[in-house]
Image (cartoon, rainbow, N blue to C red):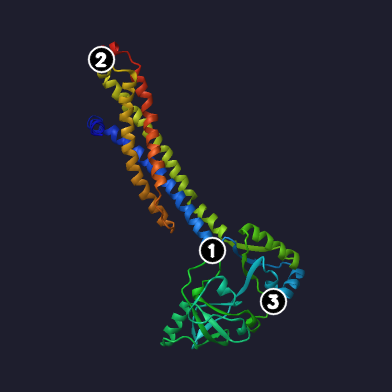
Amino acid sequence: MIFWLKDAFSLFKYYRTRFIFSLVGIAVGVGAICALSAVKVVVNKNSEQLLQKYGSGRFVATIMPMSAKEQKLVEAKLSSHAVSQFCQDLLPNFQVVPYQLLNIKSTQNSKNLDAVTIATASDIFSLMQWRPIQGRVLHPLDKHDKVAMIGNQVAEKIRELSSAPEVIGKAISLGGHYFTVIGILEYVELNPLLDFDANQSIFIDLNLLNRFNANTILDSYIVEGVEQTIPESEAKFRDIIKNELGVQQVFFRDALVFQQLLFKQVMLTMKILTLVAAITLFLGILSILNLFIILIDERKKEIGLRLSLGATSSHITWQFLRESILLSSIGGISGIVFGQITAYIIVRKLEMTYYGEWKSWMVGFSCSLLVGIGAGIIPAKLAAKLHPVKLINS
């Protein structure tokens, strides 16, 4: 090991510029490969977590009737008084919860709450696993009662406006109708599948929808397929809507869409890393070739003397190949450190969770060894084939 380090110091001492240029080229190239490998692993793990987190069979469907005939069938089955039976009929293949965003003003003591009002079924809390931090959630028996479940940020707003810590039992105005707060949700992480933030929402029973809007059709549904993948569940749900309601236009939001967006988000970064790796490694290989051709030319007498004293061609080949591998290994180790730092910065910029992965280290170090062998074998073989007498007399 000490002998190898002496070789490296000698290369640096006598061929400093070419040594540094070769080292930088290999380090940047290996670093780009290492970062590329690490980012791929991180993206795959984050996408897997995304599917697990938001349900491998869960999606949000929006039904949009386009013709008068479709509208009539939808009004008969998806209105607030009939939609519960429609959802019940979809069991056991699907667990479905309807909801509708209401464009109404929400106030407390005539002060705006800046909240979104959601008309929905009480099953939404069990399906989404939303739990109350205080009070209780909506119950099927509340379908005719003017009660509301609120998100924690809405509760904070009410406390701020009323200067009172107690929120349960307070009256809030929704579109001119007064509702009593019966529960406060615990903090809910933002779900990209939904078009609302539960923390800034007010939930009321869907049977009260006709008090606010003449149009009582619920067009949005949280759907969870039982023992089915997302594409299978969506295809089956689309067929049911088409056959029973005649509606052709059904739009879906699911975890697969966000998984694809995640991959598209890093695609440009991966292409840039690939281009950087290819260019810098190519330049690094050329630098090593150039360095060793000059090195062989300057050490002709040494090579000739060694061959005259009994050294074989394999000994000469290994002499230069060893130095090439040593140079690329130093560059590779530097590149691995550089690549991991680069991967971490990229991942944090993309707001993903970073995972250290030893496989990317192995990929980077393997590439550096291959570069060292590939760039060093040609000049090493050429040196081994030279005639010792000609070399001594040169």
Q: Can you see residue 156?
A: yes
Which numbered disc, 3 or 2, marks the residue that appears first in the sequence?
A: 3
Q: Image point 64% across, 84% down: which residue?
A: 211
Are there few (<14), some (14-19), or many (20+) residues within 10 Å of tag 2? few
> Measured along the vertical axis of the image, is residue 196 above or below residue 344?
below
Q: Amino acid at mark 2?
A: Leu
User: In the figure, residue 179 lies in which quadrant?
Assistant: bottom right
Residue type at the position of mark 1:
Tyr
Q: CA distance from mark 1 to mark 2?
A: 73 Å
Secondary structure beneath label 1: loop
**Within 10 Å of the Cα at label 1, are there few (<14), some (14-19), or many (20+) other Cα atoms?**
some
Q: How far apart are the alpha carbons under marks 3 and 2? A: 99 Å
Q: Are marks 3 and 2 in contact (CB under 8 Å)?
A: no
Could you say whether the residue bearing mark 2 is in a helix, strand or loop? loop
The image shows residue 288 at horizontal and vertical percentages of 34, 30
Which of the two residues, 64 or 344, is positioned nearer the viewer here?
344
Q: Which residue is mark 2?
A: 309
Q: Is residue 280 visible?
A: no
Instruction: Establish if 264 lies above or below 53.
Output: above
Quarter of the rendering occupied by the N terminus: top left
Residue under numbered circle 1: 54
Q: Residues within 10 Å of mark 3 (few under 14, many from 20)?
A: many
Relative vertical location of residue 87 with respect to residue 230 in this rendering, above or below = below
Across and down, in percent, residue 132 comes to 49, 78
Q: Is residue 5 left or right of residue 51?
A: left
Q: Nearer the viewer, residue 124 or 389?
A: 124
From the image, state whether disc 3 or disc 2 is nearer to you.
2
Residue at position x 48%, y 79% in the image: 154
- Taking the view exactly as shown, the residue that stands out farthest to the right is 69
Quadrant in which the C terminus is drawn? top left
Mark before the other along the chain sequence, 1 or 2: 1
Q: Which residue is mark 3?
A: 79
